[in-house]
């Protein structure tokens, strides 16, 4: 039985463009949108609905005004368009339309898109084709802009690099002064000095450095042992500063990683990789001014993980959203450096779940730790690394929980954030004391679980149609 995010049972349904009700609800930006979308998931609110074989769903939703809201969804993105004034993405009308389609009661018939829907779909897919053509041109070495444009872009990049260098030198002096004064007294200056330093890094067009400085400012008030944590983070920041200042001597993959960590914009490049990508997790990280959405994928044929990043301004969800458990036959273009980030490119079929699809092949906790350590060699500033643990059992430990290997005495502690989420109890209920497979991120604070499968892939509470249990 599927459970809604509010904890109430959901009816068994046929999938919409391959999606289940649970997967549609996972697209919602917040609980209020889920509840509002559920209320609009009945035929009485809609007219002129339809879907086609290309993955489009459209309809007119009755609102408080005289004109209904025009709502259209391209499930191959997915992407959404609605004439309502909502800043949420997707809005409640898009969610309601997808839930109505997922009900499978025939109230959304197959047909040709309405003119207003067809116009948006044509424009969106035309832009996607143009982007794909540009990426293919870059990959093949063809020029994509005139010599004047290239020269101007090079000059802008050089000027920005000079500003970042000045900021890095100033930050090195700030760290030197901090160490000379003693870390144990760092809490006396308060947060203002850190915020001023971060602002100077923003002025230097180094947002990555600014973000790390703000994190340093929060450490003195983080509880017992904070001087040790402050020293560790200062060391990593010093390493990043010196890496930037000596970037010409670094191997290119590491130099690309340094540019990314400092905050310079990077573009996906290199040959696209086509695969059947399984969506393992999607979660948002807000920082007050920007919301970052992370989507983890696993290539069924290549066996490689990939990370999609998208961003939204404060109060607005990022555009890209993929339901956990679906599979996408698509191309991904990797970013330079040793990381796993990629851009989602051309789709060859609409996203759809694959019933019975196995989870990624897992490893022991010891092997996962070794993989994380190896990743740190290429990116010392890495907070976490994606791993899939096989045959682990959630068990309580002193002050928390851990995932213990069923066949050995090794275990990984769960992070404090994982202990505070309902997903922990989903994981415990799924296991019932038996081994499970768990996907998540492993970092220096512990393991953060995002999805799980019971032995045999049978699914469980809150599972999607392929047996994946969402833990976030």
Image (cartoon, rainbow, N blue to C red):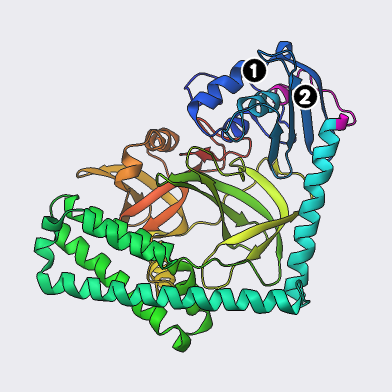
Name the residue beneath numbered marker 1.
Answer: 40
Q: Is residue 409 left or right of residue 290?
A: left
Residue at 62% across / 28% down in the picture? 85
Picture quarter with the N terminus: top right
> Which one is nearer the viewer's eye here, 28 or 243?
243
Nearer the N terminus, badge 2 or badge 1?
Answer: 1
Instruction: Determine the secondary structure under disc 1.
Output: loop
Image-quadrant location for residue 54: top right
> Which one is nearer the viewer's eye here, 255 or 357?
255
Instruction: Please tell me whether residue 163 is drawn above or below residue 248 in the rendered image.
Output: above
Query: Is 328 colored magenta in this rendering?
Result: no
Image-quadrant location for residue 409: bottom left
Q: Main secondary structure of the magenta part?
A: loop
Q: Is residue 444 visible?
A: no
Query: Is 106 colored magenta in this rendering?
Result: yes
Instruction: Please tell me whether residue 89 is drawn above or below residue 346 in the rendered image.
Output: above
Disc 2 vs disc 1: Cβ atoms closer than 8 Å? no
Instruction: Please tell me whether residue 133 is drawn above or below residue 433 in the rendered image.
Output: below
Image coordinates for residue 372, horizontal then vertical, percent: 41, 66
Task: Please rate how many residues cluster around mark 1, counting C-alpha atoms within 10 Å: few if below 14, some from 14 to 19, many from 20.
Answer: many
Image-quadrant location for residue 136: bottom right
Q: Is residue 235 left or right of residue 109?
A: left
Name the residue beneath numbered marker 2.
Answer: 59
Instruction: Please tell me whether residue 71 is drawn above or below residue 401 in the rendered image.
Output: above
Image coordinates for residue 300, horizontal then vertical, percent: 65, 56
Residue at 74% across / 44% down in the picture? 76
Image coordinates for residue 166, horizontal then vertical, percent: 37, 76
User: Over which residues does the magenta segment extend?
Assistant: 100-115
Give the Cα separation between the discs numbered 2 and 1.
12 Å
Task: Please rate how many residues cluster around mark 2, counting C-alpha atoms within 10 Å: few if below 14, some from 14 to 19, many from 20.
Answer: many
Residue at 14% across / 57% down in the picture? 189
Q: Is residue 187 left or right of residue 371?
A: left
């Amino acid at each position: 039985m599927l459970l809604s995010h509010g904890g109430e049972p959901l009816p068994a349904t046929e999938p919409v463009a391959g999606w289940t009700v649970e997967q549609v609800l996972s697209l919602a930006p917040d609980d209020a949108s889920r509840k509002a979308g559920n209320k609009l998931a009945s035929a009485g609110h809609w007219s002129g609905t339809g879907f086609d074989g290309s993955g489009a769903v459209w309809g007119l939703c009755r609102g408080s005004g005289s004109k209904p809201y025009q709502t259209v969804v391209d499930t191959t993105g997915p992407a959404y368009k609605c004439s309502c004034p909502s800043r949420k993405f997707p809005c409640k009308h898009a969610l309601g339309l997808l839930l109505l389609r997922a009900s499978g009661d025939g109230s959304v018939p197959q047909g040709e898109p309405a003119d207003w829907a067809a116009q948006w779909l044509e424009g969106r897919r035309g832009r996607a084709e143009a982007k794909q053509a540009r990426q293919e041109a870059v990959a093949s070495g063809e020029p994509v802009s005139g010599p004047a444009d290239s020269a101007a872009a090079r000059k802008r990049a050089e000027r920005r690099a000079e500003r970042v260098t000045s900021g890095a030198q100033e930050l090195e002096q700030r760290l030197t002064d901090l160490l000379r004064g003693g870390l144990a007294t760092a809490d006396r200056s308060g947060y203002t000095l850190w915020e001023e330093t971060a602002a100077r890094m923003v002025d230097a067009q180094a947002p990555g450095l600014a973000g790390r400085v703000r994190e340093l400012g929060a450490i003195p008030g983080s509880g017992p042992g904070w001087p040790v944590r402050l020293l560790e983070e200062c060391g990593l920041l010093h390493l990043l500063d010196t890496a930037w200042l000596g970037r010409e001597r670094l191997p290119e993959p590491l130099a690309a990683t340094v540019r990314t960590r400092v905050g310079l914009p990077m573009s996906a490049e290199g040959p696209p990789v086509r695969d059947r990508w399984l969506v393992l997790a999607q979660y948002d990280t807000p920082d007050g001014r920007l919301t970052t959405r992370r989507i983890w994928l696993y290539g069924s044929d290549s066996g490689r993980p990939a990370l999609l990043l998208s961003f939204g301004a404060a109060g607005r969800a990022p555009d890209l959203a993929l339901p956990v458990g679906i599979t996408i036959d698509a191309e991904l273009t990797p970013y330079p450096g040793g990381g796993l980030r990629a851009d989602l490119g051309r789709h060859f079929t609409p996203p759809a779940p694959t019933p019975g699809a196995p989870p990624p092949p897992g490893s022991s906790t010891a092997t996962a730790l070794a993989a994380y350590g190896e990743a740190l060699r290429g990116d010392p500033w890495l907070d976490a690394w994606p791993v899939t643990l096989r045959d682990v059992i959630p068990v309580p430990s002193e002050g928390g929980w851990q995932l213990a290997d069923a066949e050995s005495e090794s275990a990984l502690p769960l992070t404090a954030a994982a202990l505070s989420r309902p997903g922990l109890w989903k994981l415990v209920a799924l296991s019932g004391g038996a081994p499970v497979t768990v996907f998540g991120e492993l970092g220096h604070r512990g393991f953060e679980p995002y999805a799980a499968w019971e032995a045999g892939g049978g699914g469980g509470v809150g599972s999607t149609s392929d047996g994946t249990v969402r833990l976030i």
